[in-house]
Amino acid sequence: MSAFIVGLTGGIGSGKSTVADLFVEQGAALVDTDAIAHELTGPGGAAMPALIAAFGAQVVGLDGAMDRAAMRRLVFADPSAKARLEGILHPRIGQLAAERCRAAAAPYVILAVPLLVESGTYRERCDRIVVVDCPESLQVERVMSRSGIGRDEVLAIMAAQASRAERLAVADDIVLNDGERAKIAPQVCVIHQKYLRLSAEKVKAGC
């Protein structure tokens, strides 16, 4: 029987990690595709031989992990590099995410996918989609504050992602993170109860 899977997404700086952690505190399992990507591209990571074969030693840092800054420069300079990178990473991330969702021992799984709306394939795996939403101006402020990058660079990253409206259009549930952390936990508690009920219904239906 497949697990009850909740896809969690949101734009950069929306607070996805904070919300994911709150669901875990309630008893959900977490499968984080960003964490899997870091695992695959870390020192000795399973994707490193294929990355080196495709791009050469220039994308490997001194620690043996993928040099993310070097890869970003390469992708910006060569549009085909992005497709090659995704061709190596995405199938591996997808396979590991699926295995970990199946192995999870919890009432439901939070499958955190930053680019869930853009990827398409993850949507098909999920029983529900929860979107962490916040005003775009707040996204910019948060990312500038935590990453030390300029406004123009933040806006460029946001422009490459799905828009706020596009994310909200696919949302089954929404957690509003508009600046007051104290408001987030009660929203997660309410949605958690809904997921417990829906998960139990799925088990009962045997599907």
Image (cartoon, rainbow, N blue to C red):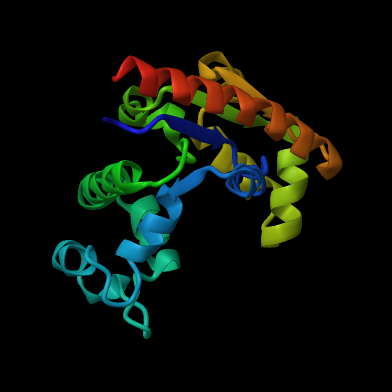
Residue in view at x 47 percent, y 31 percent: 6
Q: Nearer the viewer, residue 26 or 95?
A: 26
Indicate left or right for 195 with 87 as reference: right
Q: Give the number of callouts.
A: 0
Toward the bottom, the furthest residue is: 62
Is 54 situated above or below 103? Answer: below
Judging depth in this view, the residue of 121 and 76 nearest the camera is 121
Q: Residue 111: tell me if it is visible.
A: no
Question: Residue 80 at what x, y percent from top left?
Answer: 24, 45
Residue 173 appears in which quarter of the rendering? top right
Quadrant assignment, res 205:
top left
x, y (%) of residue 142? Answer: 74, 49
Name the residue at 57% across, 41% down. Answer: 156
Give coordinates of residue 76: x percent, y percent.
39, 51
Quadrant the C terminus occupies: top left
Q: Can residue 92 be seen by looking at this rendering? A: yes
Residue drawn at (59%, 28%), measured in percent from left and top?
Answer: 131
